[in-house]
Image: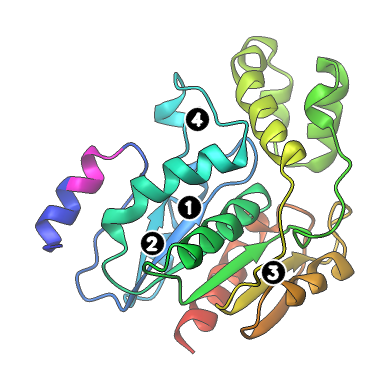
Amino acid sequence: MPQSSLKESTLKDPWIAFHKPRPQARLRLFCLPFAGGGAISYREWSAEMPEEIEVMPVQLPGRERRLREQPFTRMDLLIDALSVAMAPYLDKPFAIFGHSMGAAIGYEWARRLERDHGPTPVKILVSARRAPHLSNTDKHYLLPDDEFCDHLREMNGTPVEVLANPELMQLLLPLLRGDFELNDTHEPQLQPLLACPVTVYGGLEDVEVSRSDLSAWQDVTTGKYKLRMFAGDHFFLHDGRASLIGAVAEDLLG
């Protein structure tokens, strides 16, 4: 796809936000959000990445400029839509990064791409997420509002100012519950194993996802596996952004 066409396409495409085209980039990096998050989490990544990497922040329905759309609550339907939406951008080497819920989405998207024998990622990078085959009995999306908000507060991913604003929380709760339903109802399959390499990132103080949860990702691929740990809790994505971006760039270009 010519670069001018790519720029016009992403400007019009609701699935891509904060995109800055890089004609000479060696690969594209699709970035998928955590539950309740959006493409804005990756808004600064392009400026901090080497020129060889073109950052493609993915904007899912139900958030930010797509706030009026219904969020997906079933993984298979999301992957169906995502696969169609991203197909025009897979005309050069690419990788997939996802944090927490985004890691699960990235894993399932990579599986779909390999299953369909089309373009496949050179690597997937999963962050703050237990390996997909580990049991998940959480049903947080069914909690009453006050308990649900308490859980969000414990995870430290939603700003205190947002949690303290009843009107804003009423606006955001459908998205948050939808994302948690997507997480909590997802029943991933391990077979067939991925062929692409998997790099895993985790927070040393993350009480949600342990090091052993992260290490189990080595069981999902026949490709290479690597684990990196960072200072911080479940959302080291924010507080440790510079270190994380540096590691991602090194892992993609090294």
- Indicate the position of residue 160 as horizontal and vertical percent values: 73, 30
Q: Report if the CB atoms under discs 3 and 4 are less than 8 Å apart.
A: no
Do tag 2 and tag 1 residues touch (Cβ < 8 Å)?
yes
Image location (x, y in percent) of residue 15: 37, 41
* N-term mark: 2 or 4: 2
CA separation in Å, label 3 and label 1: 16 Å
**Which amino acid lies under the numbered mark 2 shown in the image of this protein?**
Val
**The residue under label 3 is which amino acid type?**
Tyr
Real-space CA distance between mark 4 and mark 1, rounded to the nearest whole angstrom: 14 Å
Instruction: Give, as a single range, the part of the protein colored magenta.
Output: 9-13
Q: Name the residue that disc number 4 marks.
A: 63
Dot 2, crowdedness within 10 Å: few (<14), some or many (≥20)?
A: many
The residue to which callout 1 is attached is 42
Is residue 159 visible in the rendered structure shown here?
no
Q: CA distance from mark 2 to mark 3?
A: 18 Å
Classify 10 Å Cα crowding around label 3: few (below 14), some (14-19), many (20 and above).
many
**Label 3 close to label 1 by CB (< 8 Å):** no
User: Which of the marked residues, 3 or 1, is nearer the chain's N terminus?
Assistant: 1
Image quadrant in which you'd find residue 75: top right
Q: Residue at x 74, y 19 (%)?
A: 164
- Classify mark 2: helix, strand or loop: strand
Marks 2 and 1, the one that precedes in the sequence: 1
**Against 28, is 5 above or below?**
above
Amino acid type shown at disc 4: Arg
Residue ID for mark 2: 55
Q: Is residue 174 located in the magenta-colored stretch of the structure?
A: no
Element at badge 1?
Answer: helix
Question: Which quadrant holds the N terminus?
Answer: bottom left
Q: Is residue 235 left or right of residue 42?
A: right
Q: Amino acid at mark 1?
A: Tyr
Residue drawn 51% across and 58% down?
112
Q: Counting residues from the N terminus, which is met first, the one under dot 3 or under dot 4?
A: 4
